[in-house]
Image (cartoon, rainbow, N blue to C red):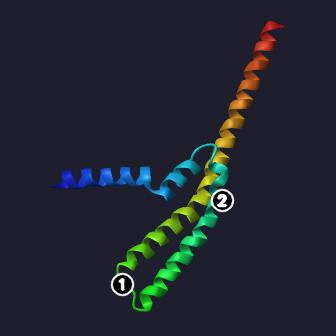
Amino acid sequence: MIRQLWTLSVHTRAFLRRYMPTNILLDAIRTRRGLKWGVPAMLLAAPYLLAASTLTTLIADGGPGWLNLLVLLCLWNTMKFVIMGPVSLILLSSVRVSEAAAAHAEQRAMAELVDQKA
């Protein structure tokens, strides 16, 4: 039974990572080219907050209870985008430091080769 639940959760996660738009966007931001878009992507949290607020108002005015699931989904996506901004800055800085270290090591190796030939 636990094995079936585990398998179901793995397949659900794989489906959501592959086909849900926010997960696709966040995966694109986590690439080296996309790290610079982490902070602007935080602006996408605003429409999700607006949608959650609107849905909450609809629920309070007598709307169906299943809209609470959409409120949770909007708030979850809001948190994902708000967190991704600072995380992308940290990842970008670490990547740039490692790239600078690699460039420095390459320059040092080239200088050593030039010194050996001279």
Q: What is the residue that sits farthest to the left in this orientation? A: 1
Name, please, the residue furthest toward the bottom: 61
Q: Which of 71 and 64 is in front in this view?
A: 64
Mark 1: which secondary structure? loop
Q: What residue type is labelled 1?
A: Pro
Q: In this view, does 114 lie to the left or right of 4?
A: right
Q: Which image quarter: residue 48? A: bottom right
- Residue 54: mark: none
Q: Report the front residue among 118 and 62.
A: 62
Identify the residue at image location x=55%, y=75%. Answer: 49
Q: In screen coordinates, is 108 left or right of 74?
A: right
Q: Is residue 98 above or below residue 115?
A: below
Residue 43 drawn at (x, y percent) = 64, 66
**Res 65 quadrant in image:** bottom left
- Between residue 6 and residue 68, name the one nearer to us: 68
Q: Nearer the viewer, mark 1 or mark 2?
A: 1
Residue on which disc 1 sits: 64
Residue matched to label 2: 39
Q: Residue 97 location in percent, x, y?
A: 68, 41
Mark 1 vs 2, N-terminal side:
2
